[in-house]
Image: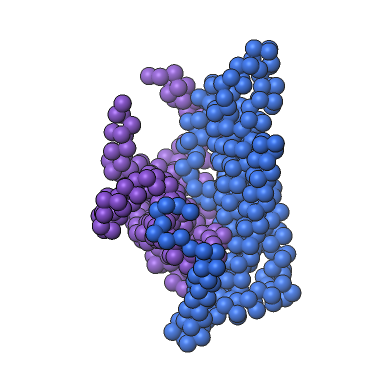
Chain colours: A purple, B blue
Amino acid sequence: MSRRSAIGLATIATLALAWYLATMPLELISPTRFPSPLDVWLALQQVALKGYANGLLYQHILHSLNLVVLGFLVAAGTGVPLGLLMGWSARAEALINPVFLLIRPIPPLAWIPLAILWLGLGDAAKIMVIWFAAFVPSVINSHAGVRSIEPAVIEAARMLGTPRSRFVREILVPAAAPMIFTGLRLSLQASWTTLVAAELVGAFYGLGRILNVAQTDLYPGMIFVGMACVAIFGWATTRVLAAIETRSLSWTQIAEALP
Amino acid sequence: MNALRLQTLSRPQTAALGAIGLLSFLGVWSVLSLSGIVPHQFLPAPHEVAARFFQLLFAPFAGATLQEHLASSALRFAYGFVLGAVVGIPLGLLMGWFRVLDEIVSPAFDALRFIAPIAWVPFAALWFGTGIGGPILIIFAGSFPPCLINAYRGARFVPRPLIEAAQMLGTGNLRIIVEVLLPASTASIVAGLRVSAGLGWQSLIGAELIVASTGVGFMMVQAQLAASTPTVMSAMVAIGLVGLAIDVALRALEAAVRRRRLA
């Protein structure tokens, strides 16, 4: 084990011990303010086995996960092509950019009330908000990815008379791919933040719903469980995306490994 | 212009296309609204939103006029943002200099970073109430990480010769941090401030939507409950404008820092 991970483990162990000591034997922190490890365990048992806020833990998790993935896919599926188009065509960029600049300063979370007005508290409103939130980073980074392609590569392709469809498939997308993935990572983060916020504002199921009910019930143990789930699944989806990135960009590492 | 482009556009062409884009955006919006394809209650026309915006500057909604709500949001934002910078930047620099501190703080920091700032809302309300303390914690949760990360990266990427020269001259730790690391990583820190201002402002709006009794986010929730779409949209415009103003100010700071470095 490296020195770094040893110190890291030691820190986390110390924090866990301090948490236990401060909340249980020493009672430095009132249980109404911050839960003890036991409170968290009981809350976890309750939500996992008996259910809380309209459902069992796995139902809440699946519900939130499903919405994040759907919203993210809709946003990436529209944002990346639009970004590529704006990077490729000067006309498209000139046409779309002003509208984009007009909408961009509005923070994604500010769309939540409008989404509720339009679509209610159900899933459609959540997907709309995630779409707006995750759309912008995808567009910006795909655009930047196209603009960063070496002009020599493009000129070579053009000189060899590469047909347009092949050019897009074999040069444009691969060359912009690292930047596209940077954008997708930011989009994924934005998806989670917006979903949790939207569920906190109003929802029937989901991790944000757990947080919301636990807040009204003044139930610190359950708040902790909700936050931990948000962090764990946020992390897990990021790992999945990173794995997809490594697989699809394997050629960049091969290129780096070459002498 | 990039050689990628098949054609490069002249300035008037770009402006004309931009105007066409904007006008068709507003045009489609107006047509959808005025023709009744989308119920008027849900989608007021652009000029109606503009009228409502000016009306809100004089007639109070949810207890205050628009600029009063904005002022109370901006105050919260300022507190949270300054707190994030004041804690994040020194901690980042220290972590960049003292290896042990980096190794101790990083695991906990990485774990906490995956919690979306907005998920702090229940604890923020429980610990600090819904007045000003609770929202400040949430803005802090949004704006602190980029400050720390950029100060840390800035400090780690300071050219070795600079540090070695200082060390050879017998400079102490504190002076190295203040007089070598801080100036050398200013550009990175200011870039971090821009990111953290954006995240902080957005977290504030989220916090105000959920727990607050003043502020522009609170105003939006009240407008949503009253089913007043023009008010919701006016608030969105106001939020966008303030966010833009914050970004322009920090961009000016960034440019000023760059000029000083070149001079």
Residue B202 position, x and y percent, is: 57, 55
Residue at the limit of the structure toward the front, as seen here = A159
Task: Please report the residue visible at 58 percent of the width from the left and 51 percent of the height from the top.
Answer: B198
- Does A70 sit above or below residue B40? above
Residue B5 position, x and y percent, is: 41, 57
Task: Please report the residue visible at 72 percent of the width from the left and 68 percent of the height from the top.
Answer: B64
Quadrant where the C terminus of chain B is found in the figure: top right
Residue B51 position, x and y percent, is: 65, 79
Residue at the limit of the structure toward the bottom, as seen here = B35
Q: Is residue B33 left or right of residue B163?
A: left
Number of callouts? 0
Q: As rendered, which of B222 and B1 lies closer to the eye?
A: B1
Task: Please report the residue visible at 47 percent of the width from the left and 28 percent of the height from the top.
Answer: A12
Residue B132 appears in view:
no
Residue B1 appears in view:
yes
Q: Quadrant of residue A164?
A: bottom left
Q: As rendered, which of B197 and A66 lies closer to the eye?
A: B197
Q: Quadrant of residue B65?
A: bottom right
Residue B18 position, x and y percent, is: 52, 68
Q: Is residue A86 left or right of residue A160?
A: right
Q: Is residue A124 left or right of residue B125?
A: left
- Does B250 sit above or below residue B160? below
